Structure formats: structure tokens, C-alpha cells
Image: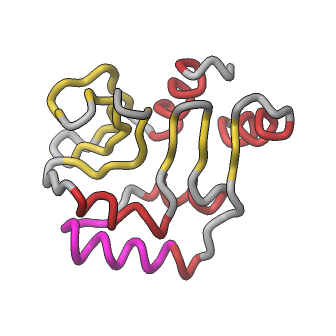
Amino acid sequence: MILATLRQLARDSMGVYLQAAASETAIQRMQEAARKDLGEPVPEEYSEFLRFSNGAQINGAYCESAEHLVPDNLDVLRPEIILLGNEGNVAEFVFDRRDRKFHTIHMGFPDERYASFETFAEMLTAVLHEQQTL
């Protein structure tokens, strides 16, 4: 449901910019690299998002592409999280391995959470609201 809304917002030029879907090969490579370098695969919900759009910009918020997700996580390795995107120099969108939930955190501080979500779709919906596109 949220992906259909995202697609419509992108069509209406509402500050939402989508990419072409990631190929299965790119997603498979990302997952292999994540298992090897991050210790576990990226959550399947995020892989589903990448099959829809290989990264995205929602006003000032960005979601990682399949090709950049693992390298960007390795830039500042924090074993407790998998970085999925960011909101400039303010917040990061992460999957926390400890509680298996998605969170918006204070940039660089995994335990300083602005919001927590059971699913990636819930987090994406919150980002759309926060970025004033919904």
C-alpha cells in the first residue's frame, strides 16, 4: 500500500524521487555482501523496497540503494544496526539487530531513538509524513 502511495507522490512531483527497481542480481550481491561484511542479510522488507525503487529521495530524506548499502555501512561500522538511509545530518533510518525493529535514530547514536517501528513500511510512512509529502 505505501509503495503505491510513494509511486503516486513521485508522479505528482511532490518531492519524491524514485529510481528504477534494483535487479535481482544487485539485490543478491547486496545480500551476499551483507552476510559476509555485516554478519547478516538486510531485512527482506528492504529488499522488497529495492525491487520497487533502488533507493529514493523524499525531500531531505534518502534511502540507500542496493549498490551503496553495504559500503556505506562499512564506512562507520556499528555492529548493532544496519543503516538503511538518512535525513541529512540529523537522523538515520536503521534496522536494529538487537530488537529486530526499524528505528529513526539520532545520527551516529543507535540508542538515541526518535521513533521505533515494527516494519519498514511503517517507518517509510513516518518518513513521508515527516518530510511533509503526505
Is 29 located above or below residue 100 in the figure?
below
Q: Residue drawn at (15%, 51%), measured in percent from left and top?
A: 78
Residue at the spot 33% in from the left edge and 67% down from the top edge: 71
Q: Residue furthest front?
A: 89
Q: In the displayed structure, would residue 106 be above or below residue 130?
A: below
Residue 34 point in image, percent of width and height: 30, 70
- How is the protein colored in the picture? secondary structure
| Apparent side of residue 71 relative to residue 47 in the rendered image (left or right) | left
32 drawn magenta:
yes
Q: Is residue 34 left or right of residue 46?
A: left
Which residue is found at the position 40% from the left and 61% from the top? Answer: 69
Residue 70 percent coordinates (x, y): 34, 65
Q: Is residue 65 magenta?
A: no
Q: Quadrant of residue 131?
A: top right
Q: Quadrant of residue 85?
A: top left
Task: Residue 127 in the image: state x and y as whole percent.
Answer: 52, 27
Q: Identify the image quadrant of residue 79.
A: bottom left
Residue 74 is situated, as x and y percent measured from the top left of the image, at 24, 63
In the foreground, 91 or 126: 91
* Quadrant (top left, top right, bottom left, bottom right) of the C terminus: top right
Q: Which residues fall within the magenta stretch?
A: 27-41
Q: Quadrant of the N terminus?
A: top right
Callout count:
0
Identify which residue is drawn at 32% across, 76% down.
33
Magenta: main secondary structure? helix
- Look at the picture and state if 46 lies above or below 93: below
